[in-house]
Image: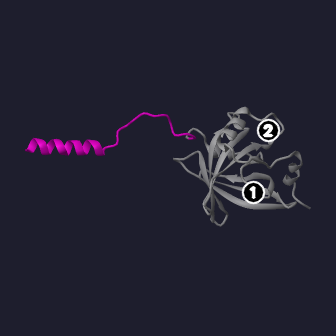
Amino acid sequence: MHKVLLLAILIFLATDMPLPIHTSPERGSHYDMKHFVNTTDPIWTYKTTNDGEIICEVDQMESITQVDIRYQRLFLMRRKRYEIPLRGQFYYFHRDRMTVTSRDMAPMCTEILLYQARDMSCAVIKIKSLTERGDARFDLRIRNSSIHAKLHGGCHNFFYFHVGKRPVYPLYKPTCQRVLKRPK
């Protein structure tokens, strides 16, 4: 009787313990959002699945620390230039993402780095809203120093793989460079 009870306890304990199973690493875990955004080079949203009225969207870093980045998001909407101060918070255990808030800490979205070129010229980002329900959107972002070069094939392919059949909206064109200049 005691043997049966002891066996039952051992089976219960054995099935309740997590077993170390070696699998491939979590996708995106080898990408580091902080490394991609840590540049004085403006980062353009080149293409997106977001169908808003925004064009010429670009992020410009102001400062960066181990835990966060402060930056300006500039864009045109109905021919008017907007400048939004933002903060991105990095995570030690999820290096592929950052939570974007306004400067007064109102939550906006989580940005997840799905792919980045080895030379850091471009990246594919998944954006999940923290305030609205709905599908995530995908952005193809390119550093300003690479905007006129041939697009990295990996970024292009990875972007369209994740986009699937959703419509894609181009946000960048060469005249967007004027957004970087402060109005007089």
Relative image position of residue 128 (x, y in whole percent): 62, 54
Relative image position of residue 29 (x, y in whole percent): 55, 40
Q: In this picture, is 148 found above or below 126?
A: above
Depth check: give the residue in front, 88 or 153: 153
Amino acid residing under circle 1: Gln
- Residue 115 lies in what quarter of the image? top right
Disc assigned to residue 9? none
Q: Element at badge 1?
A: strand
At 7% from the left and 44% from the top, the residue drawn is 1
Which region shows up in magenta? 1-28
Q: Residues within 10 Å of mark 2 (few under 14, many from 20)?
A: some
Residue underneath mark 2: 146
Residue underneath mark 1: 72
At 79% from the left and 61% from the top, the residue drawn is 83
Residue 13 falls inside the magenta stretch: yes
Structural distance between the alpha carbons of marks 1 and 2 = 20 Å
